[in-house]
Image (spheres, rainbow, N blue to C red):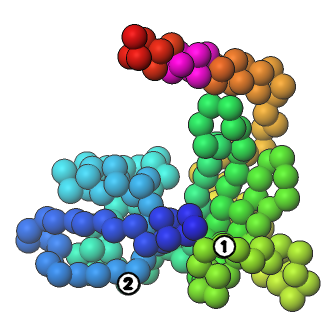
């Protein structure tokens, strides 16, 4: 399940005199927080960036932190264009895709994301809340890609690039067997 990668990825920070040692946190942080953290540690401003400096969180200066986090995907590489966005809030994860039905999971009850609750009427209010939360994140991050349809021309060019990659890979393998 991708949830374990998203929610339980370790991150180690060390800045003597600023960050006390031996801390653990379950706060929702993201890769977009790394650059603002480095800039903050260097005494520089990170205004205009999507992420937040982790220093106030790690140093204990703040108890207030985000309660939701947006995750994005553009697919799994050449040949697979599947633009999607997910919002993680509390134990729930809502995934919305451009080209097919979304997903809703209770990550505490279903950490491997096997039971999609998107059509479960008992979760309709939660689903509406998660959709609204995702829209807020999209607006705050000025994310226009999600609402811009992928054109057939782009898909065709991506397929051609993927096929060219496969041909180069096959030629390389062939050259190594001679």
Q: Quadrant of residue 162?
A: top right
Residue placed most toward the observer, 63 or 153: 153
> Regarding mark 2 in the picture, which secondary structure is present there?
loop
Residue positioned 66% across, 61% down in the render: 86
Furthest-left residue in view? 17
> Is residue 38 rendered magenta in the image?
no
The vertical placement of 67 against 96, above or below, is below
Residue 104, image x, y percentages: 75, 72
Residue named by callout 1:
113
Residue 148, image x, y percentages: 78, 38
Say which quadrant the C terminus sits in: top left
The vertical placement of 140 against 91, above or below, is above
**Secondary structure predominantly adopted by residues drawn in magenta:** helix
Q: Can residue 95 be spotted in the picture? A: yes
Residue positioned 50% across, 71% down in the render: 4
> Regarding mark 1 in the picture, which secondary structure is present there?
loop
Residue named by callout 2:
63
Instruction: Judge from the rendering whether residue 141 lies leftward or rightward of residue 139; answer left or right.
Output: left
Residue positioned 27% across, 50% down in the render: 39
Q: What span is in magenta?
A: 164-170
- Asked whether the residues under the numbered discs 1 and 2 touch, taking CB atoms below 8 Å apart as contact, a structural biologist would say no
Q: Quadrant of residue 1?
A: bottom right
Furthest-front residue in view? 178
How packed mark 1 is, by other alpha carbons closer than 10 Å (few <14, some 14-19, many 20 or more), is: some
Residue 72, image x, y percentages: 61, 52
Q: Quadrant of residue 167?
A: top right
Residue placed most toward the observer, 120 or 175: 175
CA–CA distance in space, label 1 to label 2: 30 Å
Residue 91, image x, y percentages: 60, 83
Instruction: Judge from the rendering whether residue 78 lies leftward or rightward of residue 27; answer left or right.
Output: right
């Amino acid at each position: 399940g991708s949830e374990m990668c998203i929610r339980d990825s370790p991150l180690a920070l060390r800045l003597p005199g600023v960050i006390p040692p031996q801390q653990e946190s379950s706060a929702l942080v993201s890769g977009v927080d790394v650059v603002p953290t480095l800039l903050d540690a260097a005494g520089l401003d990170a205004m205009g960036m999507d992420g937040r400096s982790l220093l106030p969180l790690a140093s204990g200066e703040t108890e207030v932190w985000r309660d939701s986090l947006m995750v994005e995907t553009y697919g799994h590489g050449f040949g697979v264009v599947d633009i999607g966005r997910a919002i993680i809030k509390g134990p729930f994860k809502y995934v919305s895709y451009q080209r097919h039905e979304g997903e809703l999971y209770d990550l505490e009850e279903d950490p491997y994301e096997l039971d999609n609750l998107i059509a479960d009427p008992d979760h309709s209010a939660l689903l509406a809340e998660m959709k609204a939360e995702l829209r807020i994140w999209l607006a705050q991050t000025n994310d226009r890609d999600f609402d811009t349809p992928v054109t057939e021309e782009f898909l065709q060019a991506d397929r051609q690039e993927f096929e060219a990659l496969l041909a180069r890979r096959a030629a390389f393998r062939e050259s190594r067997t001679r």
